[in-house]
Image (spheres, helix red, strand yellow):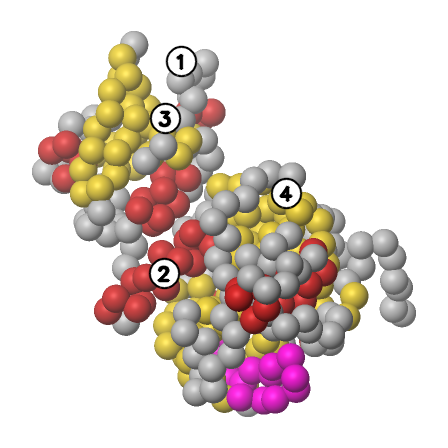
Amino acid sequence: MLCVTAGAQQPVPAMTPCESDTAGNVALDFAGHIACAARSVVSLLPVWPDNASRNEEPEGSAIVVGDGTLLATADHVLGPALDVFVRTSDGVSLRATIALRDAATDIALLRIERPLPPVRFASSFAVAHRACAIGNSFGLDISVACGIVSAVQVSGVRFNPIEDFVQTDAAVNPGMSGGALVNEEGALIGLLSAIFTKGSDSNIGVNFAVSAALLQRVLDDYLDDGIVSHPKSAMVVRPTQAVTSPAFSGMLVVRVKAGSIEEKAGMRADDIILSANGRRLKRAGSYRAAAALTGSGNRLTLRVARGGDIKDIAFHLE
C-alpha cells in the first residue's frame, strides 16, 4: 500500500536551467536550487553475480562530482557488483567503472564516459538549516525529501570505521544511499549513507550522510594519486564519559606507542584530548574522524588537558 503523508518524497519537477544560476543572470528560488542539484544525482544499478545472496540487485544512488565524469556513492550499495550502470534524470543508461572503494568511510568512486552536471559543494551550513535528501527512493527514480540539519560532526554511530556524519530528519529510504544531502541553495553537505531504524524498516527521522568534508578528503586523495589512505594512530583513546567524574570532557589517552610521532611530540597516557584542529572531541570515533579529515602528512594540533594545565601539542600525521 502506498501512503502519501506530509513530508513524503515528491517527484522532481522540471529542471530550471542551472547555467543561469552560475552565470548570475537569474536568481533561482528554493525549488530551483533543489531542482538544479537533482540533475547531479543519478540512479545506481549494480549488477551482482548469479550466486549473490539476494535474488535481485539493489538500486541505489550516486552524485556527480569533479569534472562531471566522476561519481561518488555509498560503498555498501555496490556490494559484490561485477558491473555497474547508472540511469540519468533524462532516462539514459550509462555504464560506470569502479575507480575506488573505501569501506572505512563507506565511500566509492565511479567513472563514466559522458560528463554530467557536477554538484556544488557547500561552503558552510549549521544545525537547524534546511536540508534536502535527493536519491532513488525504493528504486522509483530520483525524488526529493526535505527537513533540517539535526546535528553535525556525528561519530560513534558504529556504521563505519571512520564516521563524520551530518544527521538529518529529511526522509531517507532504501535506494537513496549514495544520494545527496544538500542545503537550501542546492549545494552538497553530505552523501547519504545510513538510516537509523531501531529494528524497523520505517524511517524515524534519524538519518546520516557522510560529510561533504570527508568526501572531499577522499576525492582529493584519489585525484592526487589514485588511492586513499587514512592516518594511522599510535594512540588508544576513549571518551572521558567512561571515567568517573572527569575534570575535562574529551578523549582520554589510554596508551601511546613507544617511539611514535605522537609520543615524540609529547603525548602521554592519561592526557585528555579536548579538540583536534579546533574540532571538539566527545564521542567514540571523533579522534579518528578528525585525523581522517586532516589527512596523512598534514599537521594535527591537539588541545590537551594534563593535570590542571591545558597545552597544544602538534605533529604531522603518518
- Residue type at numbered disc 4: His
Reply yes or no: does residue 71 show up in magenta.
Answer: no
Q: Is residue 225 above or below residue 285?
A: below
Q: Nearer the viewer, mark 1 or mark 4?
A: 4
State the image coordinates of residue 164 (x, y, percent, origin top left): 46, 47
Q: Which mark is residue 29?
A: none
Q: Taking 158 as reference, is 39 left or right?
A: right
Q: Between disc 2 and disc 1, whose residue precedes? A: 2
Given this view, does label 2 or label 4 mark the residue nearer the observer?
4
* Residue beneath disc 4: 129
Magenta segment boundaries in residue numbering = 78-94
Q: Which residue is mark 3?
A: 274
User: Quick check: 20 above or below 238?
Assistant: below
Coordinates of residue 266 in the picture (x, y in percent) = 16, 27
The residue identified by callout 2 is 218
Neighbor class of circle 1 (other Cα within 10 Å; few <14, some 14-19, many 20+) is: few
Circle number at residue 247: 1
Q: Residue at x 71, y 49 (%)?
A: 147
- Who's the residue at 24% across and 69% down the image? 225
Residue 311 position by quadrant: top left
Please say if the residues under marks 1 and 4 sit with CB atoms less than 8 Å apart: no
Rounded to the nearest angstrom, the CA distance separating label 2 from label 1 is 36 Å
Q: Secondary structure at mark 2?
A: helix
Q: Which residue type does callout 2 highlight?
A: Val
Q: Nearer the viewer, residue 183 or 197?
A: 183
Amino acid type of the residue that numbered disc 3 sits on in the rendered structure: Leu
Q: Is residue 80 magenta?
A: yes
Instruction: Label 4: state its secondary structure.
Output: loop
Question: Which comes before the other along the chain, label 3 or label 2?
Answer: 2
